[in-house]
Amino acid sequence: MTLSDGVSAVTSTSPRTAVPLKTDGSPSAPAKARAGARRAKRRRTVLFFMAPAFLGFLIFFGYPLIATVYYSFTRYDLINPPQFIGFDNYIRMFTTEPLVGTAAYNTLWLVVVLTVCRVVFSLGIASVISRLKSGVGLVRTLCYLPTLAPPAAATLAFVFVFNPEFGPVNRFLRLVGIDGGLWFNSPAMSKPALTLLALWGSGELMIIILAALLDVPTEQYEAAELDGAGPVRRFWHVTLPSISPVLLFGVVNSIIYALQFFTQAIVAASASAGTADVAGNSKLIGAPQNSTLTYPIWLYVQGFRYFNMGYAAAMAVLLFIVSSGFTWILVRQLRKSQHQEEGA
């Protein structure tokens, strides 16, 4: 019996045969076909499980986005068929519509002030909670609870609390000799009052930042303390760089939140005016004196009160472009800073 016959016998008795190979060591055609069939089966399995997500994306985001872009170039009132008018809606937005400028200014004010205050406030509260030694769970729960309140109910409660006549805030301020002002009834103080309302309900961002703070390695603080760094320098050189991605998320989230500011502003305007009939009386939109008229509110008025759906679609497209632009710029800056840190 030769050596080759022995090898053949051992190979033939093995339970599973090896993949047939060509003389150059590459898989044969049947082996390639079986491997391709297995890969195709895996792809079909992955697509099967991802199909619901893809379908939901197409139905609830893809199709509405395409339809909105299409209607933005038409004159459409939900009754008659849409008529193509080109860029007339966009031209009207920038030339002949005076309240668009007011709504854009109010929204821009909220974007700048609300974003800065919301991130700083959430970071401050999270920093305080991360240093507590006892009662952390209770304090964390109390700070997060306002987030669970419905926006309309929370706004009504805030309007009552800041009522200039009998509200608890102004009563307390009068006791200490301070004039509390008109708050939601004053054009100059209505947006700051809305900002306070948004800060009161920023517990979700606070929890996210708190998780990032607790995840910072203690070794970095110890090393910085050994180098003589004080609390301020440790916070500036250790804490902030470590949680910078989370802070960027908070900035992006707050910008989008301010760009879509709707419910609180429209409820506060109606409640401060003493009536809840928002949809039936255009004078209450943006009260007092259009100081709470945000861009989404004016979009809603144009689309669902005046039935200018084409014009409202053009406003929605512009809002989407601005939101996407802010997000892209901030994400790009984050990636650039990360590359600089890795290079250093």
Image (cartoon, rainbow, N blue to C red):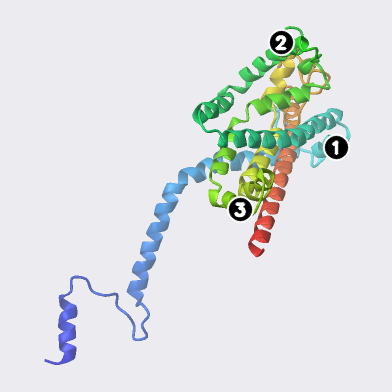
Nearest the eye: 295 or 123: 123
Describe the element under mark 1 as helix, strand or loop: helix
Answer above or below: position of 281 versus 291: above
Q: Residue at x 75, y 9 (%)?
A: 175
> Residue at the top extreme?
166
Q: Which residue is mark 2?
A: 167
Q: Which residue is mark 1?
A: 94
Kindly report the distance in space between the C-alpha atoms of the residues bearing marks 3 and 1: 59 Å
**Which of marks 1 and 3 precedes in the sequence?**
1
Q: Are the residues at dot 1 and dot 2 in contact (C-beta closer than 8 Å)?
A: no
Q: Which residue is mark 3?
A: 226
Q: Residues within 10 Å of mark 3 (few under 14, many from 20)?
A: few
> Residue at the bottom extreme?
2
Q: Residue at x 71, y 21 (%)?
A: 266
Query: Label 2 sits on what residue type?
Result: Gly
Classify the position of the N terminus by image quarter: bottom left
With 10 as the anchor, is 166 left or right in this view?
A: right
Percent coordinates x, y for residue 192 in the rendering: 77, 25
Nearest the eye: 324 or 135: 135
Kindly report the distance in space between the C-alpha atoms of the residues bearing marks 1 and 2: 41 Å
- Which dot, 1 or 2, sits closer to the camera? 2
Describe the element under mark 2 as helix, strand or loop: loop
Classify the position of the C terminus by image quarter: bottom right
Percent coordinates x, y for residue 271 in the rendering: 71, 13
Kindly report the distance in space between the C-alpha atoms of the residues bearing marks 2 and 3: 51 Å
Nearest the eye: 222 or 86: 222
